[in-house]
Each structure stands twice: as structure tokens, then as C-alpha cells.
Image: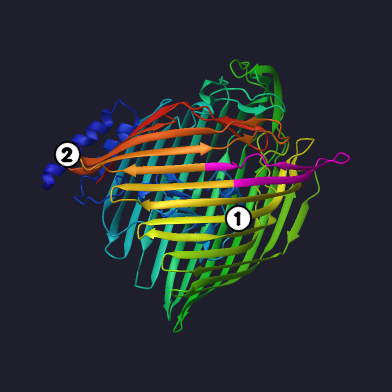
Amino acid sequence: MNQSQWARRGRFLKQRCKNATRGTAEALLYGSVFVLTISNSAHAQRAKENAVAEASDAFGTTVGREEVGLYSASSARGFSPSQAGNLRIDGLYFDQANQARPNTRMIRGSSVHVGISAQGYPFPAPTGVVDFKLRAPGDEAVAGALVGVASFDQAFGEFDFQTPVVSDVLRVGGGVGYARGSSYRIAARSWEWTAGALARWTPNDVLTITPFWSYTDHQEREERPYVFIGNSGVPPRYRATALTSQPWTTYGFAGGNYGVTARLLLGNELTVDAGMFRSESSTAVNDEPLLQNVNTLGQGTYAITQAPKRDNRANSGEVRIAKQFDTDVLHNTVYGSVKARDRMSEAGGSDTIVVGPGSLTSAPITPRLAFNLRPVAVIKADQVTPALGYEGVWRDVGQLSLGVQKTFYHRTFAVPGSPLLSSRSKPWLYNVGGAAYVSNALAVYASYTRGFEEIGNAPVNAANRDEVVPAQLTTQIDAGVRYQITPRLTFVAGVFEIEKPFFNLDAVNIFRQLGSTTNRGAEVSLAGNITDRFTVVAGATFIDPKVKYDTGAAGGQVDATAVGPIPGLIRANFQYRPSFLEGLTLDAKVERTSKRYANSANTIRLPSAITLDAGVRYNTELFSKPVTWRLQSFNLTNEYVLTPSANGQLNSLDQRRFELSLAIDF
């Protein structure tokens, strides 16, 4: 196509973008095509994204909007790596401010490292480590757009690009995204804008610098109530989308993440990796309805809580030096690292007004209420952690990982009109792990890790709502086997035990430490290609989550099953490419959740459930560009499932829903 033809197509697409009447998704699609008509480069960026195809195990992989595996940034082995502070960006320590999760303009995907996949990963942590991968720009001009619609009036559009500015020296990339209705479960109306920009500068063969910036603006209107059950009876049946919304309530936040990573190759097998990150978010005055003490009939007490404007920010980073040296039989790496963070969080100040009786089908509609907001608490946490580590690999025999860290932690808690509260901790942390290669296909592994982790924030129904509680000592031990069934199919099985302090609501609704919790469990993973056309990512985890705490009453020691972790979870994704139509892929996901308790007294038990998702994707061409059409169905059998939280909240699985999307590369 000559330049005049490209210009005519550009003018046509620009006019189509201006005249688009079928929503923002169409406008983004045509706008994306227009921007890239000046370039004739066509390499896959969005159309080829496929989490099942890219997953190396079933422990958690995210690629773009797709997520597969047992675990994620919010759930691994019954805990949350994100709450624990176990996040990395391209392998470097990153402290995420509340509500500032990296968006897909900045991040191409992530992976969860537990078990043997954490072996050799510098300075692992209990609960697992989640590593985000930057959408770093490459050497050629590439762009991709993704648009789609879904049930419950959802629509979305995304556009990402990369291009060289100075050949082999400077490359830049970025993108924008829009989603409507993504919070349909908790609000009648919602929308979200995302944006991001990245660059990669390689002035020579030894230095690479990657700065990045991302931004998210999330808004909701007409909030639906959070549902909290009482202490007895059979849980009610409801779907979140059927709950009555309060017309005047709003919820929103804005913020993002930015920073820079760098790698310097000094020669003599000496490498320096460094990252500096800033994570921040700001919430407006937010309203959240609550339906509390809901009985079997769906009746309860309706209240609305309002929180004042609050800000959160976290500066963090790591400098790590790695020196490699080999002997006749060993490949050795010695690490020196310093991690640091400086976090400020605002919490509290909320006011809750009880409106009166309500139900799942008929919440009282009330005029705008006059809340009495109070000053917010300011929580600051400073932490510096120097560390030394070693990794040795003996070819065909095994590997050994060692690490020792000394962390210096200081936390202050300040409320206007009250004395400043301050605490310090200086614990030693360490990890040791090893694997033995029994054969070319079979390896056995074991590890022990002592960490210092965040426990999380107080829930929405706590008197000290959103308060970031102090970091705590935690431990993890695990062991297992990995078997390479074929070069493209891997089986992993392991057992683990994690011990942490137990935080929950006390008798006066304060979220604080009450005792200890222990998750003992087993996990298995089967991932890879069964045949050239059949791919599987299947896993299972079985957890015995126990808590031990004092109720405060005489003889009040309690040993109970923890609420939240799923005792038994089986999740399997399958993809099959039939031979009769090239480019066609059939996929399915089967998930089984076991029975589990819904309340801390262990008197309410939820039934087990099996859900089925199914879909089809078709790779073809549009405007002579590679595209992928994808149709997905979720909860195809319309199963009813409730998910409990330790604070008494119940979330219901959506009824059957569908999503249609188109990804195109330029």
C-alpha cells in the first residue's frame, strides 16, 4: 500500500472515529487503527495473548486480561501475597499503596512463585511472591487494540503501542484503556480509565534503563450493599446484580504507579539490578451501604457508612548485586541486596448511620444523609532490609539457595488530638531451600522461609476501617516433587505449612491481633501440551486452615477452622485446536470448590459447587491485520456459589454471563 492509500485510509478511519455512535469501545478501535496507519509494521501484541498457552505451571499466571491457575496476587495458599507485601516488578521489590494495583497499560502479566518455582528466586517470602512483568517496548513498531462487550452492560476498549525512536537505543510505548460496568456487582453504574507510558533506553551494551508511568481513574455510582450474615441459620440466596442500589451513593479513587528499573552489566559476571518505585492513590468521599446480620430469609439491618477523602502513597525500591562464578561442577551466584520502603496511609474517620430494617430484595431508599466525619489517622511505616544470598547449581545433581536478611522497621500511628504511637522491630529473616535431581525428569525439593509481612487492612465493617496493621513475623515450610512427563508437560506436587498471627474483628468491632493461624496443605499442578493441539493447565490445592485465639471471656480459648481459605479447590483450564479449521481454539474451565464454613463460630457451612466456563477463539485477519475473535461464557450451568470472608461478608457468584471481544494487531 502506497503513502496516498495510507493517507486516505487514515482520513476515513479518523472520520469513523468521530462519527462512532456505538460506544467508546468502537471509538477506541478505530482510533487505534488510525494512529497506526502510518506504519506498515505488523507484529503480534494483543491478538496472541493467551494465558493458558504461556503458563509454565498451574500456580498462577496472568497475561493481559486473562488469568489462569490456582493462585493470584490476592490469594495464594490461603493468604494474600499483595496484602503481605510480597510483590515485585521485574524481580525487584515493590510496595503497593492501597487500591493502586498496577494496570495493564503498565504490566503485560504476572506470575505467582511458590514451591519449586520460588527456588532460586532471590529472597523468597512466605505466602509466595508475585512478579509483575512490565510491558517494556521492543525493537519494532507494534500496536494492538482490544475491544469487547459483556453481560450486565459491560464494554471495554484498550490500545497499546510501542515504537523505536532511536534505533537500538531508545524505544517508547504506552496505551489507554476504558471500561464501563466493570464494577456491576457492587454498583449500578461504573467506569474506569487507565493510561500508561514506558521507555527503554540502552545507550550501550551494558546498561538498560526502563522508566514507566501508569494512571487509573475509577468511579462508581449507585452503590449496592455489602452483605454480612448473622451467626445462625442457612445463608440466604441472592445475586449481587439483583441488590437494590442507593441512588445518591458514590465511590471512586484515582492513582497509579511510576518509577524506573535499571540493569548494569559490569563484566566478570557481575550484574547490578535496581528499581525505584512510587505507588499512590487518593479516594474521594465514599459511600458504602451495608446489609448486616442477614438471616435465612434475606432480612437484616441496612446501614450506610461514609469515609472521608484519604490519600495513600508508598516509595519503595531495591538495589541488588549478583556475582556469578563457576567451578568444574558448580554454577554459583552470590547476591547482595538492599530493599527499602516509606509508606504513608490514611485510615479511619468514617461514620456509619443505621437506616433501619432491610432485605436482599428491598433495601430502604433514603435521602442523602448527614454524616459526622472525623479526622483521619495517619499511619507511617519505614523499613530498610539489607540481605545476602547464595544460589548454587550442581548440574545433574541439585541446587541450593540460602538467604539472610536483617530488617529495620519503624511504624507510627497518629490521630489528631491523641498521643503518637510508635513501634520498632529489628528481626532477622532467613531462607534455605534445596532441590535434588533424582533423574533427568524427577526433582525433589524442600525449603524453609522466615519472613516479616504485612497482614493487611481492616475491613469495611470494622471500627478502624482501612487501618494498615503492623507487619508481623511469619514462617513457611514446604516440600515436594517436580516431574517432567514430556519436554512440554510438567507435573508438580507439594505440601506446605504457613504460620501467621491472626487478625480479625474483636468484641467491640476493632480489627486487631487475636491469636495465630496455621494453613497446612497440599497442592498439585499439571501444565503443558498433552498433544500438539491439546493444552492443559490444571491444579488442585487442599488446605486445613486453623485459627487459635482468645475470646476475652473466661475459658475463652478457641480452636476453629479459619473462614476465607478454600479447604479444597480444583481448577482446570483446557484448550484444543481442532484440525478441521486452522486458527480455531476451543477452551473450557472447570472449577470445584469444597464445602467451607461461612462464619467464625463454624456453625454455618456452605455446600460444595462445580462451575463450568467455556469459550471459543478464532485467529484470522481483518484489514489484512491479525485478529482474534473470542466468545466466552462464564458459569455456563448457572451454579449458585457463595464466597465467605473472615469478617462475615458473603459474595455471590454471578449468574450465567457472556463476553465477546476482538483483539487486533497492527
What label sits on residue 496 in the rendered view? 1
Which amino acid type is marked by label 1? Phe
Mark 2 and mark 1 lie on one chain; the one further toward the N terminus is 2
Residue matched to label 2 = 9
Determine whether 189 is above or below 390 in the image. above
Q: Position of residue 214 (x, y in %)?
A: 45, 48
Residue 29: which quarter of the image?
top left
Q: Nearer the viewer, residue 382 or 562?
A: 562
Magenta-colored stretch includes residue 565: yes
Is 169 colored magenta in this rendering?
no
Task: Identify the colour scheme used.
Answer: rainbow
Residue 65 visible, this angle: no
- What are the residue bounds of the magenta stretch? 543-569
Task: Using residue 413 as the reference point, say whether residue 403 is left or right of it.
Answer: left
Q: Is residue 236 above or below residue 590?
A: above
Q: Residues within 10 Å of mark 1 (few under 14, many from 20)?
A: many
Q: Residue 544 in the image: x percent, y percent?
A: 64, 46
Which x, y percent locates residue 534? 32, 47
Asked if residue 186 shows in the view, the reply is yes
| Of residues 621 and 425, the one drawn nearer to the viewer in this rendering | 621
Who is closer to the viewer here, 14 or 629? Answer: 629
SS under mark 1:
strand
Q: Amino acid at mark 2?
A: Arg
In the image: residue 571, left or right of residue 2? right
What is the quadrant of residue 236 in the picture? top right
Residue 328 image point, x, y percent: 44, 84
Residue occupying image coordinates x 69% and y 26%: 371
Q: Whole-Å distance between the Cαs marked 2 and 1?
A: 58 Å
**Relative to 515, is 493 on the left or the right?**
left
Give SS at disc 2: helix
In the depicted structure, whether residue 460 falls above or below residue 446: above
How crowded pointer 2 is (Cα within 10 Å; few <14, some 14-19, many 20+) is rated as: some
